[in-house]
Image: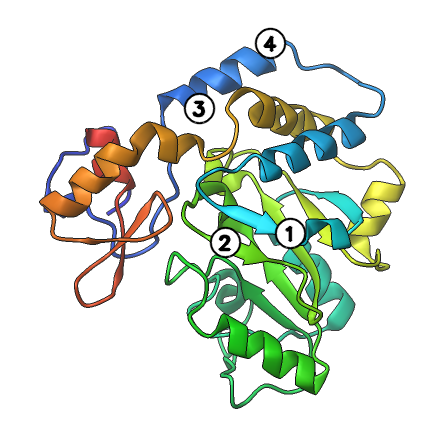
Amino acid sequence: MRDSEEREYTVDWLQYERQQPMYDEDINNFYGSVLRDIPAHVEMLDSDFKGAFHEWLQGHTLSYFTGMEQFPARDVIQGVTQYIDDLYQRYGSLQIFENDYKYHWRLNENIEYKTLDTLDRRPLLISMPFPYHGDIHPDMDEILEKCLKLKIDVHVDSAWVSCIRGIGFNYDHPAIKSFAISLSKGGLGGTRIGVRYCRVRPDGPVTLMNQFNMNQQPLMWIGQRFCEMLGPEYFWKKYMDKYRKVCFDFDLVESKAIHLAKTKEGKPVGVRSLLRAL
């Protein structure tokens, strides 16, 4: 069931399909405050946003991420989906594991998902955190080592970094060539702004957009203000106790993403509506 203002704190409002990321009235209030001051043009806004974003990433205290310094080529992206589109445009096709971001299936209903044993030489795109698990893919270490052995370039979709806790990850595995993070799952789903990190800046649409200052200034402005005003792990720090109550009351297993829990059978279920009902 999709979220709505008529939500109730009942089992009927658990989301077994299309689990929605967290959102609340404080995000609406945030938008209202920053949009009053939005500039028509701010010199070096892209650099300011990327700087604030990186500080936000390093400021996580419930999770930790290392190895980012080995990815000095950083570009603004309009959400991780733009990063994904850029990869498809540059490579033509990608390898994807089952239960990753449903966008891949929507692009190609006949997609053939890969397993550890069926990887070929094409680039692999994998989410970290992985949506189905709300955590790092359980085979992530083996996947990266297999890709290194087969000389498969790995690109990491880290869209969920803005909504998780309790994860430690080192991006500086030699198989990983790039990763991207956005603020969408942290509350800015209607804004879609983030940063792509690359070891070496590739040719392609994202690079062109950044080289010619074609990124949308309002999005960068809002993203910068979000990083500075609300900080990392905003929803976890606000809803931690309520999240645990929902999981206890409805006999769910906690995940590491604020809007997601698991049934006892391991099926992902969205809890946004119940968090908001509380």
Task: Give the mark nearer the N terminus: 4 vs 1.
Answer: 4
Task: Give the mark nearer the N terminus: 4 vs 2.
Answer: 4
Task: Give the mark nearer the N terminus: 4 vs 3.
Answer: 3
Q: Quadrant of the C terminus?
A: top left
Instruction: Choose mark 1 or mark 2, whichever is in front.
Output: 2
Q: Amino acid at mark 1?
A: Ala
Where is residue 80 shown, x and y percent of the image?
Answer: 61, 50
Tell me which corner region of the image, top left, top right, bottom left or bottom right, holds residue 76. top right
- In this rendering, position of residue 204 left or right of residue 121: right
Q: Amino acid at mark 4?
A: Arg
Where is residue 216 shown, x and y percent of the image?
Answer: 73, 32
Q: What number is the disc on residue 36?
A: 4
Using the image as rendered, state which of residue 252 and residue 66 is in the foreground.
Answer: 66
Instruction: Choose mark 4 or mark 2, whichever is in front.
Output: 2
The residue at which mark 1 appears reads as 180
Where is residue 170 shown, x and y percent of the image?
Answer: 60, 58
Question: Dot 2 surroundings within 10 Å: few (below 14), some, or many (20 or more)?
Answer: few
- In this rendering, position of residue 249 left or right of residue 17: left
Give the CA separation, mark 4 to mark 1: 29 Å
